Image (cartoon, rainbow, N blue to C red):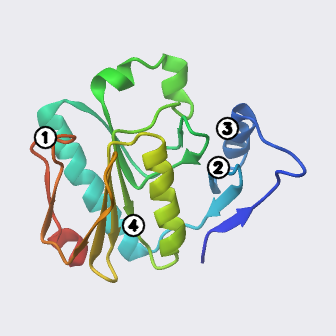
Amino acid sequence: MTAITINFNNVIKLTSDQFYQLCRDNPDVKFERNAKGELIVMPPTGGETGKCNAKLTTRFVLWNEQTQLGEVFDSSTCFKLPNGPDRSPDVSWIQLERWNALSSEQREKFPPIAPDFVLELMSPSDSLSETQAKMDEYMDAKVRLGWLIDRKTRRVEIYRQGQPKEVLESPTSLSGEDILPGFVLNLRIVWG
């Protein structure tokens, strides 16, 4: 299955509250919205992608429990990005001070904040060009570091604020740099 993009803009432009309510009223469907306001219906992942994503999220949670520098979010968390899109990265992390600056109501709904770090793990149904456009939206929203990991091609694209995209072929590990201090992801869990 592939993601389906629906453009309702000439009929109705959903407000943030309406989009939130649409998601609440349809809990079995995963929705996102791109920067153009188009609704994206996301298919569920397959077993291998889900297994890999769980392992990735676990690595971030364990690192974060040791450092206590922020909060880690899984792929079911939708963020209302400051540049307009509503997106759900596969793994994301927000610095603790920034997260705590949000009100409890903001933290409960779709947090109106760009994560400091995002990771997108390509699944067989994902389009590379659409996922790269999603990464560009994250960078436009001022995400500081982003990783796009493609298991099939063993390729990683690293996105950094104010810098050109870096492409790595079959890397063995990735560093969290100064965004995720001390975090190193061993890519054996991804490549298998």
Compute the Cα span from label 3 to label 2: 11 Å
Left or right of 34, for residue 71: left
* Mark sitting earlier along the chain (3/4): 3
Q: What residue is shown at x 57% (from left), y 39% (from top)?
A: 83
Compute the Cα span from label 1 to label 4: 26 Å
Residue 63 sits in which quadrant? top left
- The residue singled out by tag 1 in the image is 181
- The residue singled out by tag 2 in the image is 27
Q: Which amino acid type is shown beneath numbered disc 2?
A: Pro
* Mark sitting earlier along the chain (4/2): 2
| Tag 2 secondary structure | loop
Q: Are marks 1 and 4 in contact (CB under 8 Å)?
A: no
* Figure check: 156 above or below 69: below
Q: Are marks 3 and 2 in contact (CB under 8 Å)?
A: no
Q: What residue is shown at x 32% (from left), y 83% (from top)?
A: 153
- The residue singled out by tag 3 in the image is 20
Give the label on residue 104, or none: none
